Image (cartoon, rainbow, N blue to C red):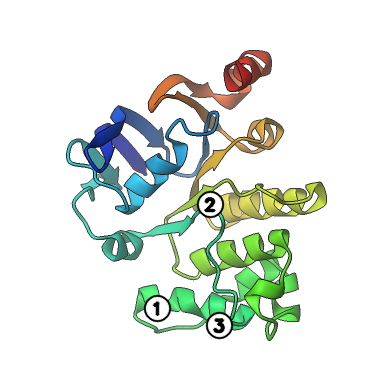
Amino acid sequence: MLKIEQMDAYYGESRVIPGLNLQAKKGEITCLIGRNGVGKSTTLKSIMGLVKTPTGRILLADQDIIHMKTYDRVKKGIGYVPQGRDIFPQMTVQENIELGLQALGGKGKVPEYIYDLFPILPQFAKRKGGDLSGGQQQQLAIARALVTDPKILILDEPTEGIQPSIIQDIGEAIRRVNKELDITVLIVEQYLDFVLGISDALYVMEKGSIVLQGRTKEMDPRKVQKMMTD
């Protein structure tokens, strides 16, 4: 589904990711983990065309999108929820959700399954996004990304600042998105228990490079934890 080959990423003149290789296979949940500042979020921004990536390839369903504009990548089927969620606090919940339709030219309507996934959203439809809790805002942000009808959903730190009970709800929603809607998922995350419980494949990043990768169920959690904390 999504394959990164020998990709460099830059902030200004500084190369922060050298020659990255990473793959999110169709129908799976793939997680990229690592300590703060190692390049995880930059990887996702690179996929979205938000940072400079002069070399390498980003293949979406075998098409190289590395030189496409961000909005064209969304049209090709990438749904993206950035770290911090980036909802519009002065807009209502319904307006935030419907904003996702703009990626489709403003046509269509919000699919009913989104309200099934996140039943709190219709209850708060007229409430301003900024009045929601952190967990509710995360659900809203994921819903807005799903409105674009993505082939792959990319989430940056979906558990950040969220209480454990809501983390469980978000984890269940992600599993349903993956299994019931057949949407491939790529997650950047630091909460290891969440990662081990939800992912099919796992990559560990240090200083912009992948230092460990494999099937999640085959990995030693103690080794992964040690790499996250040393």
Q: What is the quadrant of the C terminus in the image?
A: top right
Task: Compute the Cα span from label 1 to label 3.
Answer: 11 Å
Q: Secondary structure at mark 1?
A: helix
Task: Compute the Cα span from label 1 to label 2.
Answer: 21 Å
The amino acid on which the numbered mark 3 sits, given as a three-letter code, is Glu
Q: Residue tagged by mark 3?
A: 95
> Residue 177 or 202: which is nearer the viewer?
202
Residue 24, given in percent of the width and then of the height, sits at 42, 38
Residue 89's image quarter?
bottom right
The amino acid on which the numbered mark 2 sits, given as a three-letter code, is Gln
Label 2 packing within 10 angstroms: few (<14), some (14-19), many (20+): some
For residue 75, above or below residue 171? below
Q: Residue tagged by mark 2?
A: 83
Q: Residue tagged by mark 1?
A: 102
| Dot 1 and dot 3 residues touching (CB under 8 Å) | no
Q: Secondary structure at mark 2?
A: loop
In primary-sequence order, the first of circles 1 and 2 is 2
In primary-sequence order, the first of circles 1 and 3 is 3
